[in-house]
Image: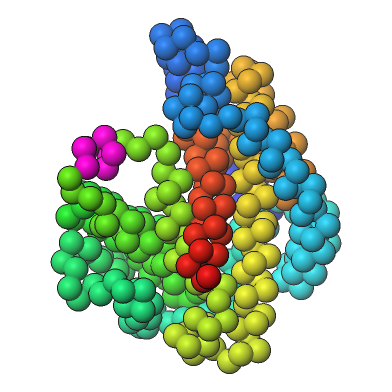
C-alpha cells in the first residue's frame, strides 16, 4: 500500500494534476465570469436546488454523533485485517479494508446472475420478460471490471455491464447497477426528455441502486439466497454496516472539502481535502490526490442524499 501511494503520487503530481488544474480553472471561470455565480459551489447549489450550508451543518452533526461508534467499530477491524494500529494509514489501506474477501466462497461468479435474477424476481421484476434490460457480464481480457448502467433509451433500452472478478464484490456491483436499471426502466415514456435525461441530481437514481445493493445487509437474503450459515451472515452484516458507515463519513468529508475548496477559490489548495477527509475517516489522504478524488458537480452530495433516500424508502417498504 505504501508503494502504491508513492507511485500514484508521482503520477498525479507529474501528469494528472496539471491537466485537472487546467480543467478546474476553465470550469470555475465559466461559471463565474460567463454565468455570473460567485463560485462553483453556488452554481452547483442553484442547480441542485438545495442549501449547501444547511447540508454542511447536518453533516457536521452526523460526524460528531457517529464519531465514537465509528472508531469503536473500525479500530478492531483495521487491527485484525491490516495488522497495524489506525495511526498513519493511507487511503490505500482503506481501499484494502473495505474489500471484504472473507466470505467470497459463498459468492462464486457462476451463481452471480442466478442469485441476482432471483433477488429481483422476488421484488416483482422478471428479467425473462424484460428485453429492455440487457446484461453483459462477459469476462473479456480487455474489459474494464468496473460496473456501469447505461440508459440508451429511458425507458426502452438499458444496459448493465460488468466484468466478474469473483466474490462478494461482484454481487455488490451487480445489485447496485441493476438497481439503476430498475429505476431507469420504470420511467414513464410519456415524460418530456428533460425529466428522463436531464434531472438536476442523480440522487433518486442512486437511491434505488443503494436500496438493492444493501440487501447484502439483510441476514435473510444472505442465508436464503446466498446460502450462508446464520453465524457467518451475522458477521458479514456487521462488517458491511461498518463499511457503509465509513463510506458515508468519507463522502461527508468529500462534500465538506469540496465546498470549502470552492468557497475559498484557490484551485491549488489541497488542505481542505486532506484535513476534512482525515477528520472524517481517520485515514491519511495525500495532497496530490485532491483533484482526482473530487467527483464532478458535487456528486458526493448526491451519494449522501441517496443513502438517506434508501434508508427512508427501505423503512417504508419494510413497514
Relative to 90, residue 116 above or below? below
Residue 15 in sight from this viewpoint? no
Q: Is residue 155 left or right of residue 221?
A: left
Q: Please tell me whether the stretch drawn in magenta is mainly helix, strand or loop.
A: helix
Q: In this view, does 222 lie to the left or right of 64?
A: left
* Residue 33 on the magenta segment: no
Q: In terms of image quadrants, where is residue 9?
A: top right
Which residues fall within the magenta stretch? 191-197
Relative to 101, residue 249 above or below? above
Q: In this view, does 17 lie to the left or right of 62?
A: left
Residue 233 in sight from this viewpoint? yes
**Depth order, front residue of 216/13:** 216
| Residue depicted at 82% across the width and 64% down the height | 72
| Residue depicted at 22% across the width and 63% down the height | 133
Give residue 220's position: percent from left, percent from top.
53, 83
Give residue 211's position: percent from left, percent from top.
47, 62
| Residue depicted at 53% across the width and 70% down the height | 319
Amino acid at each position: 500500500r505504501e508503494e502504491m501511494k508513492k507511485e500514484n503520487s508521482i503520477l498525479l503530481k507529474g501528469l494528472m494534476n496539471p491537466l485537472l488544474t487546467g480543467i478546474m480553472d476553465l470550469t470555475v471561470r465559466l461559471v463565474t465570469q460567463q454565468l455570473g455565480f460567485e463560485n462553483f459551489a453556488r452554481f452547483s447549489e442553484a442547480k441542485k436546488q438545495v442549501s449547501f450550508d444547511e447540508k454542511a451543518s447536518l453533516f457536521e452533526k452526523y460526524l460528531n454523533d457517529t464519531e465514537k461508534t465509528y472508531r469503536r467499530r473500525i479500530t478492531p477491524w483495521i487491527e485484525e485485517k491490516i495488522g497495524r494500529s489506525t495511526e498513519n494509514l493511507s487511503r490505500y489501506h482503506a481501499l484494502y479494508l473495505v474489500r471484504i474477501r472473507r466470505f467470497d466462497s459463498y459468492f462464486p461468479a457462476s451463481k452471480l446472475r442466478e442469485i441476482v435474477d432471483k433477488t429481483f424476481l422476488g421484488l416483482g421484476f422478471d428479467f425473462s420478460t424484460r428485453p429492455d434490460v440487457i446484461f453483459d457480464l462477459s469476462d473479456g481480457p480487455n474489459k474494464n471490471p468496473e460496473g456501469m448502467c447505461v440508459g440508451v433509451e429511458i425507458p426502452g433500452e438499458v444496459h448493465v455491464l460488468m466484468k466478474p472478478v469473483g466474490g462478494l464484490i461482484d454481487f455488490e456491483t451487480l445489485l447496485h447497477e441493476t438497481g439503476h436499471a430498475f429505476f431507469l426502466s420504470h420511467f414513464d415514456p410519456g415524460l418530456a426528455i428533460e425529466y428522463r435525461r436531464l434531472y438536476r441530481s442523480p440522487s433518486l437514481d442512486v437511491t434505488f441502486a443503494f436500496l438493492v445493493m444493501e440487501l447484502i445487509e439483510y441476514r435473510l437474503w444472505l442465508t436464503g439466497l446466498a446460502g450462508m450459515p446464520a453465524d457467518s451472515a451475522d458477521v458479514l452484516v456487521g462488517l458491511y454496516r461498518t463499511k457503509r458507515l465509513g463510506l458515508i463519513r468519507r463522502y461527508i468529508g468529500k462534500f465538506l472539502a469540496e465546498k470549502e475548496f470552492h468557497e475559498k477559490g484557490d484551485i491549488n489548495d489541497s488542505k481542505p481535502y486532506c484535513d476534512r477527509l482525515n477528520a472524517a475517516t481517520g485515514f491519511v489522504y495525500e495532497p496530490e490526490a485532491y483533484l482526482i478524488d473530487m467527483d464532478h458537480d458535487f456528486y458526493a452530495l448526491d451519494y449522501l442524499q441517496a443513502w438517506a433516500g434508501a434508508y427512508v424508502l427501505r423503512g417504508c417498504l419494510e413497514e
